[in-house]
Image (cartoon, helix red, strand yellow):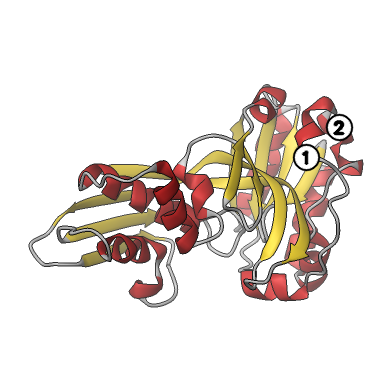
Amino acid sequence: MIAFTPAKINIGLFVTGRRNDGFHDLESIFIPIPWKDALEIQLQEEPGIQLNTSGLQIPGAPEDNLIVKAYNLLARTHELPGVKACVVKNIPLGAGLGGGSSNGAHMLRLLKEFCSVNATPEQWNQWAAALGSDCPFFMQDEAAMTYGRGERIEPNPFILTHLKGWNMAILHPGVHVSTREAFAAIKPSPAPFDLRELTTHRVEDWEGLIRNDFEKIIRKKYDAVDQAIIQLQQAGASYVQMTGTGSAVFGLFRNEKEATEIARWGTERGWRTHCSAF
């Protein structure tokens, strides 16, 4: 059984408070995008899980990978067969694109079908939240408003309707940003804008309405992220923003050729890039 696990971008990202559980309260719009990893699972005779990886290198021990954690989390309460998991990594790590979270959430989704695990939607959401803050979003396949540490989700199909006809180019300048360090440097503040009202404004006017609260911090620390933002702006993007805690940066273009050309520029520079239409 195989799943193609998408990345995401954040449209706006406000850090509004620090929680008693050590996390932060956030407000953002998450949009799944067609930059994907491939995740396959199959039975094996040995108990437990074996993880094989290819594509981009995944640092750290296998037991720290969210694919393995998803299996082990579910195995605590359900009898699971031995599973061999294979992932082909295309989504850059430490980029704010949610690739690891998507892998973990889709592992839960695969196990649900593969092993016929019966549980309520609320329980699946709780398991996903236990894996990571972005994981609950990837348990569904649509754009959504996210609140809290990411576990509170409200579907928002209107944002994709609003973006129909627009093109997106993403530049990842090869910088790995530590989520922990990014949050350690952030100072929470009230949200300056209600993101639910974003579709009442033209994309060309978003610059004065929304922001990613991590962007100034990361631009200051990583010159390559700053350069990616500048290049997208100079290429003609109507709105440019870093996604998540970085380091990937996206631009929204009316002109498909402009989006394609800046993505090609990034590729020629040795950066990982993505270009697609909404």
Q: In this view, does 177 lie to the left or right of 198?
A: left
Could you tell me if residue 178 is visible in this image?
no
In the rendered structure, find residue 159 and report the number of the disc placed on it.
Answer: none
Q: Classify mark 2: helix, strand or loop.
A: helix
Marks counted in the figure total 2
Seen from the viewer's position, the closer of residues 72 and 226 is 72
Mark pair 1, 2: CA separation: 15 Å
Residue at position x 76%, y 59% from top? 15
Q: Nearer the viewer, residue 105 or 21?
A: 21
Q: Mark 2 points at which residue?
A: 204
Looking at the rendered image, the disc whose residue lies closer to the viewer, 1 or 2, is 1
Q: In this view, does 249 lie above or below 219?
A: above
- Residue 195's disc is 1
Image position, residue 137 (x, y; %): 53, 46
Across and down, in percent, residue 123 comes to: 40, 50
Q: What residue type is labelled 2?
A: Glu
The reply to whether callout 1 and callout 2 are in contact (CB within 8 Å) is: no
Of residues 88 and 101, the one drawn nearer to the viewer in this rendering: 101
Above/below status of 262 relative to 105: above
Using a 10 Å C-alpha cutoff, classify the residue at mark 2 as few (fewer than 14 neighbours), some (14 to 19) or many (20 or more).
Answer: few
Please identify the residue farthest to the left as the structure is shown.
45
Q: Where is residue 220 in the image (x, y as percent from the top left)?
A: 83, 70
- Locate residue 200 relative to residue 139 in the image: left or right: right
Q: Is residue 60 shown to the viewer in this render?
A: yes
Please state which of residues 112 and 60 is positioned toward the viewer in this rendering: 112
- Location of residue 138 with respect to 217 vertically, above or below: above
Q: Is residue 120 left or right of residue 250?
A: left
Given the image, on which type of amino acid does mark 1 rest? Leu
Q: What element carries label 1?
A: helix
